Amino acid sequence: MISAREFSAEEDRLGFFGPDSVTWRVHVDPSFSVAGLRALLLQALHPVAMDGVARNSDARRDPWPRLVRTAAYVDTLTYGTRSEALRAVRRVRGLHHRMGGTEATTRRTYRVDDPDLLLWVHCCEVDSLLSVARRAGVPLPDGDADRYVAEQVTAAVLIGAVEAEVPRSAAELATYFERMRPFLAATAVARDAARLILLPPMPAWVRYLTPARPAWGTLASLGFATLPPWARRMYSMPGLGLTDAAVTPALRAVRQALLALPQRVRRSPIVWAGYERVAAPISA
């Protein structure tokens, strides 16, 4: 684990990625919201990783705290100082270290911080953020896509993945998913999680007196529709099928609508603090 003694004050200020990184450009984009939901849906197809979530959190009863914590963690790791990022990593690793179980369908006994499970979660996140951003219209040529995947090795290693096993290019990331497909399944727990993501519980006043339900439904449906075809087939959920040809224009339209919102509305205080700390203009 990296120590604060290993970097300078200037490195601390810039964080682990910095304003010139592709990571900052991808993570600040409004497509991040759709990509985050896609990542959760993809992660759920790993029976052991999904069992770890179901067994060790209250996400099935109340998904909102977990979603907020996950978003805050990614924002801190991306836009925080290195010291802030390391504190967030230590908190998460401390929680993971105490969690585990035995997954029923594979009969595997595991700990949540097993390196292969951490790698799966990491790759789902990186693949989702990259693929959704590109489809939404963020200009990311192949060189930038590879650079993003390579930058994210840092995030994987910080959380406990084995560096030599982490994909460093878009091609390596695609190869990883091809290798993992035989081990994936839409278990009953995964299907429950997908339904919860697509139709989460909301207080009655939120459902009926605010646009939260249709807004969430749009983002979640796009998250599902942007999954790889093989993942959508595993879920076999009817009624969610935007065709592949329709997904990209719909995603771009949603991104443009979100870009029209005031920046203070669509970005967390953590993101703003990062840009203000390095005095960098916000690109989107």
Image (cartoon, rainbow, N blue to C red):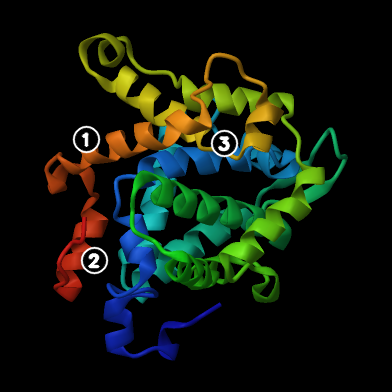
Q: Position of residue 120 (x, y in %)?
A: 65, 53
User: Measuring 41% from the left and 32% from the top, which residue is drawn there?
Assistant: 64
* Front residue of 162 and 59: 162
Mark 1 residue type: Ala
| Residue under numbered circle 3 | 41
Q: Is residue 210 left or right of residue 111?
A: left
Mark 3 residue type: Leu
Does residue 194 appear in this view?
yes
Q: Position of residue 72 (x, y in %)?
A: 36, 51
Q: Is residue 69 left or right of residue 183?
A: left
The residue lying furthest to the right in this view is: 107
Q: Which mark is residue 242?
A: none
Instruction: Say whether disc 2 or disc 1 marks the residue closer to the N-terminus.
Output: 1
User: Measuring 24% from the left and 19% from the top, which residue is drawn there?
Assistant: 211
| Residue under numbered circle 1 | 257
User: Measuring 56% from the left and 54% from the top, which residue is drawn there?
Assistant: 95
| Residue under numbered circle 2 | 274
Instruction: Say whether disc 3 or disc 1 marks the residue closer to the N-terminus.
Output: 3
* Mark in front: 2 vs 1: 1
Vertical position of residue 157 compared to residue 67: above or below: below
**Distance of label 3 from label 1 (alpha carbons):** 24 Å
**Distance of label 2 from label 3 (alpha carbons):** 29 Å
Vertical position of residue 282 compared to residue 112: above or below: below
* Mark in front: 3 vs 1: 1
| Quarter of the rendering occupied by the C terminus | bottom left
What element does badge 1 sit on? helix
